[in-house]
């Protein structure tokens, strides 16, 4: 249906397809005759969309940012301002060979794990730059440290502006920092992202303050059961005004 709810003749027609480089090394496994018994995840993350301002081009763009969940250790971003003619913006993954630097802009980090986290898109309160906030995800070991990280990337170029460590997690017990939620105090007015909240598998709730660069980190709480055992957090926090 179109925006008015009317059926369209091209309903269900594929407009485009996109495959990030970081899932390509495993694509051959789909042709395995034993695939039915050895399923291989690929690009299984649910993407997020948002409107951002490209200050260099002086125009607004609609972007889509997604991860791979258990399929790979990477995120991708597309410019879908023209839905029938999308353009690749950037890819960010754990492997330097798959996500090489462009000039002086790095597009890889070994502390990025399987990308089960949801991207948060917005304009950071610090300087009004449009950014994407990502998390380090699951099993960010070998060669990662297992520590949980928030990443703040330029929404247009994918440049890593800030990498914020929670200081929690080891190679034996990785942090598992995944789902996150943004807080926009006056989002309908200025789209400024004031805080981002995230939880990890150690039961910790974290907050980063987007009014500073690097964002100031605060440990909000550790959620435990009656016996004092930390309770893993695997869903995104919902933040609202009351």
Image (spheres, rainbow, N blue to C red):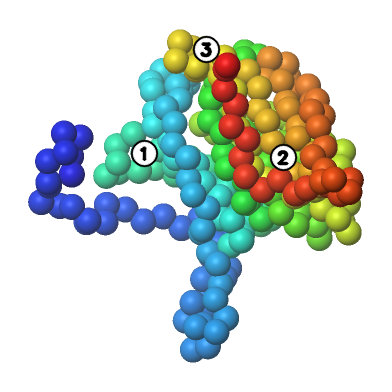
Q: Earlier in the sequence, mark 1 or mark 2?
A: 1
Where does the image place residue 116, in percent across and percent down from the top left?
A: 62, 51
Quarter of the image containing the C terminus? top right
Q: Earlier in the sequence, mark 2 or mark 3?
A: 3
Element under disc 1: loop
Image position of 28 with respect to 140: above or below: below
* Residue 77 in view (yes/no): no
Of the residues tagged 1 and 3, which is closer to the observer?
Answer: 3
Label 1 neighbour load within 10 Å: few <14, some 14-19, many 20+: some
- Distance from disc 1 to disc 2, alpha carbons, whole Å, reads 30 Å
Q: What residue is pinned by disc 1?
A: 80
Residue 186: mark in rendering: 3
Q: Is residue 128 left or right of residue 139?
A: left
Residue at 53 percent of width and 30 percent of height? 121
Q: Are marks 1 and 3 in contact (CB under 8 Å)?
A: no
- Distance from disc 2 to disc 3, alpha carbons, whole Å, reads 23 Å
Q: Earlier in the sequence, mark 1 or mark 3?
A: 1
Residue at 22 percent of width and 56 percent of height? 12
| Farthest residue, direction bottom | 33
* Residue 123 in view (yes/no): yes
Label 3 neighbour load within 10 Å: few <14, some 14-19, many 20+: few
Q: What residue is pinned by disc 2?
A: 199
Image position of 79 with respect to 113: above or below: above
Residue at 63 percent of width and 18 percent of height? 194
Image position of 30 with respect to 192: above or below: below
Of the residues tagged 1 and 2, which is closer to the observer?
Answer: 2
Where does the image place residue 155, in percent across and percent down from the top left?
A: 54, 31
Residue at 81 percent of width and 32 percent of height? 221
- Distance from disc 1 to disc 3, alpha carbons, whole Å, reads 26 Å
């Amino acid at each position: 249906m179109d925006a008015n709810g009317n059926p369209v003749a091209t309903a269900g027609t594929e407009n485009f397809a996109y495959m990030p480089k970081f899932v390509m090394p495993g694509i051959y496994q789909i042709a395995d005759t034993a695939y039915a018994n050895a399923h291989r995840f690929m690009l299984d993350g649910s993407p997020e969309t948002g409107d951002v301002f490209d200050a260099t081009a002086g125009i607004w763009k609609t972007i889509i940012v997604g991860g791979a969940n258990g399929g790979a250790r990477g995120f991708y971003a597309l410019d879908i301002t023209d839905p029938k003619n999308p353009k690749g913006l950037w890819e960010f993954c754990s492997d330097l060979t798959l996500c090489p630097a462009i000039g002086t802009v790095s597009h890889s980090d070994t502390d990025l794990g399987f990308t089960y986290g949801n991207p948060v898109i917005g304009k950071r309160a610090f300087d009004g730059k449009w950014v994407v906030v990502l998390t380090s995800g699951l099993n960010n070991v070998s060669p990662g440290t297992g520590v949980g990280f928030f990443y703040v990337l330029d929404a247009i170029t994918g440049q890593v502006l800030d990498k914020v460590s929670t200081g929690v997690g080891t190679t034996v017990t990785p942090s598992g920092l995944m789902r996150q939620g943004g807080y926009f105090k006056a989002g309908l007015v200025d789209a400024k992202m004031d805080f981002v909240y995230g939880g990890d598998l150690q039961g910790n709730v974290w907050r980063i303050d987007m009014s500073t660069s690097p964002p100031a980190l605060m440990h909000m709480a550790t959620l435990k059961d009656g016996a004092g055992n930390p309770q893993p957090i695997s869903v995104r926090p919902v933040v609202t005004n009351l």
